[in-house]
Image (spheres, rainbow, N blue to C red):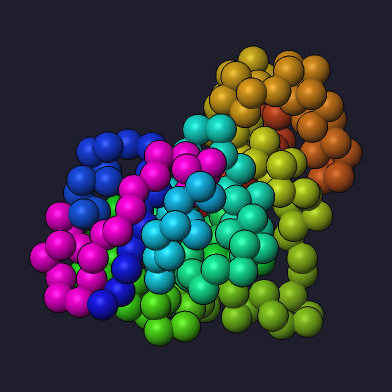
Amino acid sequence: MIKIMIADDHAVVREGLKQIISDTPNMIVVAEAENGDTVMEMLGRVKPDVIVLDISMPDTNIIELLKAINASKQKVRVLVLSMHPESQYAERVFAAGACGYLTKDSAPDLLITAIRKVAANKHYVSESLGEALASRLDRNAERPLHQSLSNREYQVLCMFASGKTVKEIAEDLCLSDKTISTYRKRILEKMGMETNAELIRYAIRHNLV
């Protein structure tokens, strides 16, 4: 029996995932969490085999949460479930310790396939993502500019590229406007750009939005 924790801040999403899993033999949902703190509080107590983890829970830094889960020494594997395209975050969550990445618009049977694969100590990636990751292993491949950004800088880049203002990003990340402006300055410097319009064009060209 595969024991699963579902971590998502939307109750409707959790119920939908529970229904899919409950209709599947040899799988059971043993816990639900709506933020990263709850995930960590319940982890040692319920001892799940797999965490189906939403990438965008409030007050939760997905990269730091993945690192904390790995540092806990629990024998648990994490499948990240995201509304964002694979090209935005997949590489970074794998580097932080995730074992699978699945977009929320995937068919239910893919969710079950991904859970089974992750539970079997394997990694789950879509065919398109697998090809993209393989191509980047080519030593002769040019490294994209956004790969030079820190995880937080990359997150801010994607938010700017989606059309959010400094104030909106600051509110979403619970940071000051000044801090977001500093991140913006660093991003522009690292990428050799001068305006948000350039960042947006770059993000669109590299499928980051």
Q: Position of 31 compared to 123: left or right? A: left
Across and down, in percent, residue 136 comes to 67, 75
Region in magenta = 19-39
Q: Pick the residue in front: 209 or 81.
A: 81
Q: Residue at x 80, y 17 (%)?
A: 178
From this viewpoint, is residue 155 visible? yes
Q: Pick the residue in front: 37 or 79.
A: 37
149 relative to 86, above or below: above
Q: Residue at x 24, y 54 (%)?
A: 17
Corner quadrant of residue 165 = top right
Q: Position of 100 compared to 88: left or right? A: left
Q: Residue furthest left?
A: 23
From this viewpoint, is residue 200 visible? no
Across and down, in percent, residue 195 comes to 76, 28
Corner quadrant of residue 92 = bottom right
Q: Residue at x 85, y 36 (%)?
A: 186
Across and down, in percent, residue 36 comes to 52, 44
Across and down, in percent, residue 172 comes to 57, 25
